[in-house]
Image (cartoon, rainbow, N blue to C red):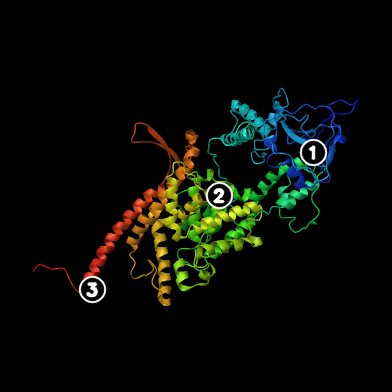
Amino acid sequence: MDKKAVESNVPLGQGRGQVHRERTPDLSSDLSFEELRNRFDTSATVRREIMSKPSTHGSATRQIVSGKIFKKCKSATFQIDGATYTIVASPPGGAGAPREEVPRPPPPAPRNGSPKQGALTIVRRSSSRGKTESSPPTDEQLDQLDLDTEHLPAVDTPDACDKAALRLRYLLRQLNRGEIPAETLQKNLQYAAKVLEAVYIDETKDRRGPEQPRMQPATLHMRRLRTPCWARCSVEKPNEAKRLADEDDELSEVQPDAVPPEVREWLASTFTRQLATAKRKSDEKPKFRSVAHAIRAGIFVDRIYRRVTNTALMQFPQDVVRVLKTLDEWSFDVFALHDASAGQPVKYLGYELLNRYGMIHKFKVPPTILENFLSRIEEGYCKFHNPYHNNLHAADVAQTVHYMLCQTGLMNWLSDLEIFATLVAAVIHDFEHTGTTNNFHVMSGSDTALLYNDRAVLENHHISAAFRLIRDEECNILQNLSRDEFREFRTLVIDMVLATDMSFHFQQLKNMRSLLTLAEPTVDKSKAVSLVLHCCDISHPAKRWDLHHRWTMSLLDEFFLQGDKERELGLPFSPLCDRNNTLVAESQIGFIDFIVEPSMGVCADMLECILGPLHSSTKNSSSSAGQEPINEESTGAEPISKFKIKKPWVACLTDNKKIWKEQAAKDAEARAKLEEETNGTSPPTEE
C-alpha cells in the first residue's frame, strides 16, 4: 500500500507540492463509517464520480465540510492501490469549483445551525496516467515475475492494470523465446482481457452530459451469470468441512498499515462471523481519522464481502455437480437431481440459481441463512408426502423459470430485485401443498378454506406460510433488504404466486392477448413474470416424453388419492379424480390442446413483444443462446425483421400429443373389446 501524501497550498516559506503529514485534513475524527460512506459513497460510485482532469490548486480557502474546516487548503491528495485520489473543496455557491462533465446528485442539506456547505470533488488519476512517459519494466523485474494467477488482484481494482501490463510484457518476451506453457499463457491472457473489460466499463459508464436526456432508445443490457457454486467449491473433497469466514482467513490480505484498526474491526464484524457474538454498545460506532481511511474502507468492502461469501458457499456433492451441468437445458432431468441429492433437489438447485444470478452477493444473503431457508422449504414440500406437488415439482418449476429468464433473455429486462423475487416465487409457489385442489378445500370446508374465504385457498397459504418462515431469524433471506425493497419484493411474490391459481387461467390469457393486440403494448413487469411462472407451473407436457409421462402418472396418482377422500366424505368426484372412470390419454390431449399450448404461445408472444425493441439496436450481437432474429417476408414486397425466441417446447408438445393420440386409439380399442366381452357378444364367425 502506498503511503498517504497531502498536497496543499501552504504558507509562505514552504514549497508547493511537498509532503506535509501534519497538514492532513482531519475531516472525520468524530464521524461514523456510515456517515462518511453516505457522504462520499466510496463503495459504489466513487469510480463513477472520478474526473479525468483535476482542478488546479488555487489560493487558500476556508471551506466547511461535515462540520470540519479545510484551513488554507483547497485540496488533499493521497494514493491507494497505485492510484492517486485528489479531493478538491470549493466554497459555498460554487465559486472556484472545478467543472464537471458528469452531473452529480446535490450535496446533503446542512445541519441545523451549521454554515452553508460547499462541495467536494473526488478526482482519480491512475499512477500510469500521471506520468508523461511510462518507463518499461527492467529485465530484472520481469525475471522476478511470478505468473501464478491465483493471487492476482480483482480485475476492477486500480492496481490490476499495472499487474496486467507487466504480465503482458513478460508474456511477449517469453513468446519470443518460446519458453511459455500454453496453459499459463491462456490464464494470464484471460486475466488481462477481464481487466481491459473492467476498465472499459468504468470509463464508459455514465458519460452523458447534462444536456442529453437520460432516456435513450432502448438497448439491451446483457446480464452475465456468475460462476456456479460447484465450480467455486472443492468438489473433489466433498467431506471436507466448510471454511468459516473469520477475520484471520478473510482479512489477512489487508496489511495493518493500510487500514486502521477501526476499519478492520468494522469489516470483521460486518462481513464475517467471528465477532457476531461480541456485542458492541449501541452508541459505539467505528471511527475514522481521515477521508483517506474512509475511502480505503469503501474500496475494500466489496472485495472482502465477495471473498467472504465465496468461501462460505455450500458444498455440492459430485453427483449433484454432474446433473447441474445440464441446468440450462429445457428438458432438465429433475428426477436425476433428486436421486443425486439424496432427496434434496430444492436445496441445491435453489442455492445454485440464487448464486448464478448474483442474488446472494447483491442482497447480501448469508449463505448459512439461505441454506436453512431452502432446507425448511424442502421440508414443507414433503410435509404431506404428495406424489406430484412436492419438492421435485418445486425444483422443476424453478429450473423452468431459470430457462425462461436466461435462454430467452428475459433476465436482461428485469432488475436484480425482480429476478430475486421471481426465483423465490418459483421455489415457494406450492409450499406446504396439501395434495388436494382448492375445490376440495372449499367443498370439504377445511380450516384453510375458512381462513382465506374460499378464494385462492392454497395459493394464499403458500405465500403466507413462506413469509412466516422468512420471519424466522435463521431463515430470513431478506434481512438486508431495505424497507422499500422488501415491500416491492413481497408484492411481486404475492402477485406471481396468486397467478398460479388455475381459476385465473383463462382471464390471465385473455388479458395478455388483448394487451398484445395494441399498436404499442406496454407490458407490466409484474404481469409478465406472473404469466411466465404460471406457464412454467403447467409446463411438464411441453418437456421430453419420458419426463412428461412420469409427471403425468404422478399427477394422476395424486388426483386419485383426492378422489378416494371425496368418496369417503360423500363428495362428488372432482375432474380426473375418479380412478375407475378417467381416460388418461384423452385428458392429456385436451390439457395440451386447450391449456398448455395456448399458454406457451401467449407467453412466447409476450416475450418477443418485450424483448424485440430491446434487441432492435443490438442485432449484430444477438448470437447468445436462445435468441435469434429471424427475417420474415410479409405479404408485401418489403421484408420485416422480427425478433424471435427459440421455442423448444413446440416440438415437445407435438411429439407428446402424437404419442398420446396413439395411446388413446389403443385404449379405445381395448375398451371396445372389453365392452363386447362384458355384453357377451362376439363377432360373427363363418362356418
Percent from the top left, x then y, of residue 653? 37, 52
What amino acid is at disc 2? Answer: Ile
Disc ID at residue 678: 3
Left/right of residue 241 with respect to residue 218 in the rendered view: right
Q: Nearer the viewer, mark 1 or mark 2?
A: 1
Q: CA distance from mark 1 to mark 2?
A: 40 Å
Quarter holding residue 87: top right
Q: Assess disc 3: are there few (<14), some (14-19) or many (≥20) residues with their C-alpha within 10 Å of its C-alpha.
A: few
User: What secondary structure is found at the residue carrying circle 1?
Assistant: loop
Q: Which residue is mark 2?
A: 419
Give the mark nearer the N terminus: 3 vs 2.
2
Question: Quick one: label 1 or label 2, which is nearer the N terminus?
Answer: 1
* The residue positioned farthest toward the top in the image shown: 133
Q: For this rendering, which residue is in front, 286 or 258?
A: 286
Is 358 left, or right, of 500 in this rendering?
A: right
Comparing labels 1 and 3, the label whose residue is closer to the camera: 1
Q: Is residue 132 above or below residue 244?
A: above
The residue indicated by pointer 1 is: 117
Kind of residue indicated by mark 3: Thr
Residue 514 in sight: yes
**Front label number (3 vs 2):** 2
Q: Is residue 311 above or below residue 117?
A: below
Which amino acid does the dot numbered 1 rest on?
Gln
Q: CA distance from mark 1 to mark 3?
A: 97 Å
Q: Earlier in the sequence, mark 1 or mark 3?
A: 1
